[in-house]
Image (cartoon, rainbow, N blue to C red):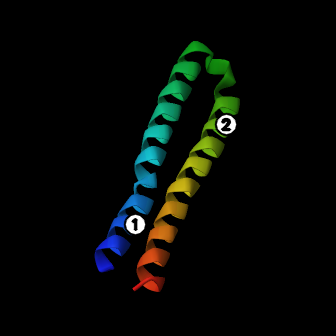
Amino acid sequence: MSTLIAIGAGIAVLTGIGAGVGIGIATGKAADAVARQPEADGKISKILLLGCALAEATAIYGFVIAVLIIMFLK
């Protein structure tokens, strides 16, 4: 049973990979957008920060679920 708990927690933590990839892609696209239209820098930065915060929240939720799996299913 302990092995299954560890596997479940490991799968829950994998959400961090998706968040990291998503933030990296978003940052690259924002840099391209600023390079094309430097006057829209403020709007692009606001949207980028909002998107990064949402992606990071997904990773944090996955981490919390992994901790809960480990703590409550032992």
Residue 45: name its quadrant: top right
Q: Earlier in the sequence, mark 1 or mark 2?
A: 1
Please provide percent x and percent y for residue 53.
60, 50
Q: State the SS at label 2.
A: helix
Q: Badge 2, how many Cα within 10 Å: few under 14, some, many 20+?
A: few
Q: Residue 16: where, in percent of width, then height?
A: 43, 53
Near mark 1 (Cα within 10 A), the count class, few <14, some 14-19 or many ≥20, is some
Q: Position of residue 10 (x, y in %)?
A: 36, 63
Residue under label 1, please give it: 8
**Spatial CA span between label 1 and label 2:** 33 Å
Kind of residue indicated by mark 1: Gly
Q: Quadrant of residue 43?
A: top right
Residue furthest front as drawn: 1
**60 shown above or below 55:** below
Query: In this image, 59 relative to 41: left or right?
Result: left
Q: Which residue is found at the position 57% from the left and 22% from the top?
A: 34
Asked which secondary structure carries label 1, the reply is helix
Q: What residue lies at 53% left-to-right and 17% top-to-bottom? A: 35
Residue with the mark numbered 2: 47
Q: Residue at x 67, y 37 (%)?
A: 47
